Image (cartoon, grey):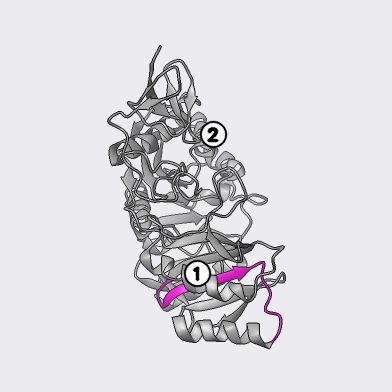
């Protein structure tokens, strides 16, 4: 008996009403007993030659509408598992070729260098000859990097290539490769001279060492240039950043004093009105944000503090009208437990993991908060990775 695909599971498989998981199926597809699939309204022709081998995309076969529905259902489904119902807004999607930050891998293959994402479910590197998610400026450096690494990469190693669009151009970070000998050192210099990256760093195992940087590298956040440490976190797309910032501003307006927890380089702190306390555990990010706040004349103090080991307590939180938190994928269980006991009126929670967000949301709701709305953001185009911003109100 044939079955229809009714939804997409968290890892990207299509799911039938009976619970069967079918790889590369789309909503509305019909699956027949022999395994063949008849295309439904949720399916499109994948634009990239590397799909589905390349792990950079898992859902390139979904239409725009189907992908947006997937992002929304990931959030709603995670909340439902914790007994929470709220308004889940239509997903805001970043367009193709908009990723400004990516980590690629490089390995010797067939007498040359393969650079790209890992194949889905394996460590094999898919040699990237086209890409429909990276900004064209990032993709344009793939071929030159292939030539550069051809003279440096040991056959037994896998190198990491981190690309980030900064104000001055592309910040290139190489790790897992060594510059042994004069020829390799000169090759790095020649790469910088020829391709003019914003910065070129090399990590030979003891941390990133700058090999080329004509001027200090910055990234513009809310109109303020912020020093960009090598390997620092940045929202994956400009569109995704704008969507999350707008949602956070809506969630905490018109607070006069805000604590931004897990503040990073200040994506949200620099965009907020009023007086802001930014709290971050990474020392290089703290120094960068302090410098940016001073130069920009912001009413901001920056604290270096590990919020997992030392979360802000209810008596400290009492000084704030609102709190913004944007924790890593693990969520913020310790800090959320303290928030649940606090009197903070408004909380904006930004998350890159619907599952840990829903867990933390349950804690806040049990502590007397109401989850007003959630805004899904699909800035990792055609990926199963979904981000969100949410508004909690006390009482």
Q: Which mark is residue 289?
A: 1
Q: Between marks 1 and 2, how big is the CA–CA gap?
A: 30 Å
With respect to residue 277, does 217 lie above or below? below
Q: Magenta segment range?
A: 166-181
Q: Mark 1 touching mark 2, by CB under 8 A?
A: no
x, y (%) of residue 61?
37, 40
Single out the residue that lies furthest toward the top: 1
x, y (%) of residue 31?
40, 22
With respect to residue 288, does 36 lie above or below? above
On-image quarter of the C terminus: top left
Q: Nearer the viewer, residue 301 or 175?
A: 175
Provide the secondary structure element on which disc 1 rests: helix
On-image quarter of the N terminus: top left
The residue located at (51%, 31%) in the rendering is 362
Which residue position is annotated with label 2? 359
- Locate residue 270: give its quadrant: bottom left
With respect to residue 312, does 354 lie above or below? above
Provide the secondary structure element on which disc 2 rests: helix
Q: Nearer the viewer, residue 1 or 7?
A: 1
In the displayed structure image, the side of residue 14 where residue 203 appears, left or right: right
Could you classify mark 1 by the number of other residues whose Cα lies within 10 Å: few (under 14), some (14-19), or many (20 or more)?
many
Q: Nearer the viewer, residue 157 or 35?
A: 35
Could you classify mark 2 by the number of other residues whose Cα lies within 10 Å: few (under 14), some (14-19), or many (20 or more)?
some
Q: Nearer the viewer, residue 303 or 217?
A: 217
x, y (%) of residue 246?
32, 53
In the displayed structure image, the side of residue 327 where residue 196 appears, left or right: left
x, y (%) of residue 32?
40, 19
């Amino acid at each position: 008996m044939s079955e229809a695909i009714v939804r997409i599971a968290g890892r990207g498989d299509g799911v039938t009403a009976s619970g069967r998981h079918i790889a590369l199926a789309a909503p509305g597809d019909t699956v027949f007993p022999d395994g063949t699939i008849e295309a439904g309204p949720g399916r499109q022709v994948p634009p990239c030659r590397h799909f589905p081998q390349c792990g950079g995309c898992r859902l390139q076969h979904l239409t725009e509408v189907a992908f947006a529905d997937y992002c929304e259902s990931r959030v709603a489904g995670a909340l439902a598992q914790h007994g929470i119902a709220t308004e889940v807004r239509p997903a805001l999607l970043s367009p193709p070729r908009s990723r400004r930050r990516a980590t690629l891998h490089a390995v010797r293959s067939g007498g040359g260098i393969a650079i790209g994402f890992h194949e889905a479910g394996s460590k094999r590197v898919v040699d990237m000859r086209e890409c429909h998610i990276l900004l064209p400026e990032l993709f344009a450096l793939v071929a030159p990097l292939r030539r550069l690494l051809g003279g440096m990469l040991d056959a037994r190693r896998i190198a990491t290539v981190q690309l980030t669009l900064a104000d001055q151009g592309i910040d290139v970070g190489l790790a897992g490769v060594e510059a042994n000998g004069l020829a390799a050192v000169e090759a790095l210099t020649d790469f910088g001279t020829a391709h003019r990256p914003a910065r070129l760093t090399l990590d030979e195992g003891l941390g990133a060492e700058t090999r080329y940087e004509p001027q200090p590298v910055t990234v513009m956040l809310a109109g303020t240039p912020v020093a960009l440490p090598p390997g620092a976190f940045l929202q994956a797309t400009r569109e995704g950043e704008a969507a999350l910032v707008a949602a956070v501003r809506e969630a905490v307006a018109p607070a006069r004093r805000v604590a931004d927890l897990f503040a990073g380089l200040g994506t949200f702190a620099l965009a907020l009105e009023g007086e802001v306390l930014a709290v971050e555990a990474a020392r290089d990010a703290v120094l960068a944000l302090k410098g940016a706040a001073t130069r920009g004349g912001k009413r901001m103090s920056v604290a270096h503090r590990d919020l997992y080991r030392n979360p802000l307590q209810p008596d400290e939180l009492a000084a704030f009208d609102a709190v913004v938190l944007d924790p890593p994928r693990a969520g913020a269980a310790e800090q959320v437990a303290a928030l649940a006991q606090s009197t903070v009126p408004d909380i904006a929670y930004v998350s890159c993991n619907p599952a840990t967000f829903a867990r933390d949301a349950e804690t806040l709701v049990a502590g007397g908060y109401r989850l007003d709305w959630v805004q899904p953001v699909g800035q990792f185009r055609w990926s199963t990775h979904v981000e969100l911003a949410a508004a909690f109100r006390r009482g």
